[in-house]
Amino acid sequence: MVATLPKRRTSKNLAAILVVVALAVLWQAVKVAFNLDGRTLPHLWEIVLALGEPARRNGPPLIVELLNAALFTAQGAFFGFAIGAVLGFVLGTLFAHVSLLERSLVPYVVASQTVPILAIAPMVVIWLQGSWWSVPVIAAYLTFFPVTINTLRGMKSPDPRALELMRSYAASTWETLWKLRFPAALPAIFTAFKIAATSSVVGAIIAELPAGVQRGLGGAILNFNQYYITGPQRLWAAIAMAALVGIVFYVVIAAIERVALRNIVR
């Protein structure tokens, strides 16, 4: 079994490389099939070469500017993810233990996600008086929902016979929570964390626009979008950097999941 683990990892890495190559081939195929010029869809190598060129006159290379913007956005996304994860876990745990709260509040939690984030973001910015904290708050708005629902589902996943066994041992609600419900819910919770991690990046980028934040990826995307005709490769590079931040968040959560669930039988 130990010998098969490196083979599985190698096959996964090879599959990931093949997916990237396939996407690159598809990109070029679409460009050729629809006869798209460089202003509509640049070549991949043009995007790569643009990273080494300054985005502004006498400015740093584009890659440096995008890395600084990515670090700034990642900071807001991290705090938003942390706030949303804690809030979602607390709500999901309460709903799992208090059926009245579940029946009365879960519909509102679901309904909250039907409101467009672009409608919520300006109000949050005004309420927080344009503070930087509006970025994490808006990111948390997108992250708390999957954590809440998956925590609720995971907390209710233990076998009823296991719950009866805990009651027969006179275990308290707190002991049942941490010794039975929480370990059983961890796979569902980490699934929600991986969804919320990427959502927090999207929320942070969207939040930077009404907040007037220019240092993050949201400001970079908005700026490069205005000059798309003359330099489309810069906008695509900014989009790729935003995707890379989301991938990093996902990979970190997946790594923590492997360590946390190592001794738990799913």
Image (spheres, rainbow, N blue to C red):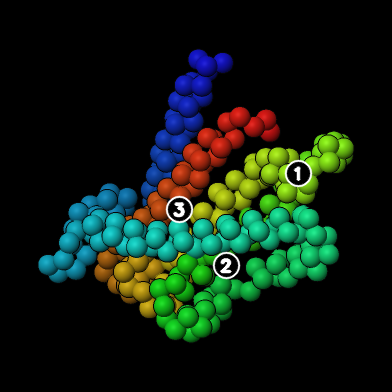
Q: Going from the N terminus, do you reach mark 1 or mark 3 first?
A: 1
Disc 3 on helix, strand or loop?
Answer: helix
Where does label 2 land, which residue? 141
**Residue 201 placed where, x, y %?**
46, 60
Q: Is residue 194 visible?
A: yes
Where does label 3 land, which residue? 246
Foreground label between 2 and 3: 2
**Residue beneath the point at 42% across and 41% down:** 20
The CA span between labels 1 and 2 is 30 Å
The amino acid beneath tag 2 is: Tyr
Disc 1 on helix, strand or loop?
Answer: helix
Q: Is residue 176 above or below residue 34?
A: above
Q: Is residue 157 visible?
A: no
**Residue beneath the point at 63% across and 74% down:** 115
**Residue beneath the point at 56% across and 37% down:** 260
Q: Is residue 264 above or below residue 212?
A: above
Foreground label between 1 and 3: 1
**Residue 194 placed where, x, y %?**
55, 49
Q: Which of the image's four quarters has the N terminus?
A: top right
Where does label 1 land, which residue? 176
Q: Along the line of sight, which residue is nearer the eye, 108 or 128?
A: 128
The CA span between labels 1 and 3 is 35 Å
Q: Is residue 125 left or right of residue 168?
A: left
Q: Going from the N terminus, do you reach mark 1 or mark 2 first?
A: 2
**Residue 265 placed where, x, y %?**
67, 30
Q: Which of the image's four quarters has the C terminus?
A: top right
Q: Is residue 135 above or below residue 83?
A: below
Q: Is residue 96 above or below residue 14?
A: below
